Image (cartoon, helix red, strand yellow):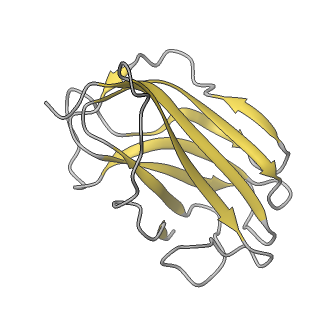
Amino acid sequence: MATVTKTGAKRAQQFSAPYGNRTALEFSFTTNAAGVMEDSDKATAVAQADKVRIGVIPAGFRIHDGLGIVSDAFTALTTAKVGFEYVDGVDDSDVPQDDDYFAAALTTHTAGRYRAANTGVKPVTLPKDAYLILTVAGADHAAAGRLDYIVEGIDKGNS
């Protein structure tokens, strides 16, 4: 299992509406024809069990929902868990890291729109910056594909 990080994931700017604090953060995961993640720190194809960091959800963000938009289907049989892990690598007992907070098996091999599917998870406010992560399953990537993942919630700021 490898960890793949999108280049500039920590620097990417996100913007919210000019009034209020309801926010949608958009992150993208794309692979080229060989299954290599574009704009990443790994030169080989994304494989099963690889953890892919596609962006940072800021501290103080209260997560309500997620939406995966697969506009270009990936390799046949590929799926992904979608969740978060803290940038500093240290878990938090009040809001534990959760690698499938949004989805335990998001379909990435079929174009479509997929809402967060894990039932029984409550909204959480992140105490510190966290990576939005995909953990690949089903098959190795070997084709071009595109997933945009939108995390919806309230930006309470880092307090």
At x 19% / y 31%, what residue is drawn?
93
The answer to whether residue 143 is left or right of residue 51 is: right
At x 82% / y 62%, what residue is drawn?
75
Percent from the top left, x then y, of residue 90? 20, 50
Percent from the top left, x then y, of residue 78? 76, 54
Quadrant, the C terminus: top left
- Image-quadrant location for residue 136: bottom right
The residue lying toward the viewer, choosing from 33 and 118, is 33
At x 31% / y 42%, what residue is drawn?
58
- Residue furthest bottom as drawn: 43
Q: Give the total number of marks visible in the rendering.
A: 0
Q: Is residue 78 above or below residue 26?
A: below
The residue lying toward the viewer, choosing from 70 and 104, is 70
Percent from the top left, x then y, of residue 2? 49, 71
At x 58% / y 84%, what residue is drawn?
43
- Image-quadrant location for residue 142: bottom right
- Residue furthest front as drawn: 18
Q: Is residue 85 above or below residue 127?
A: below
The answer to whether residue 26 is left or right of residue 89 is: right
Percent from the top left, x then y, of residue 60? 25, 31
- Residue furthest left as drawn: 159
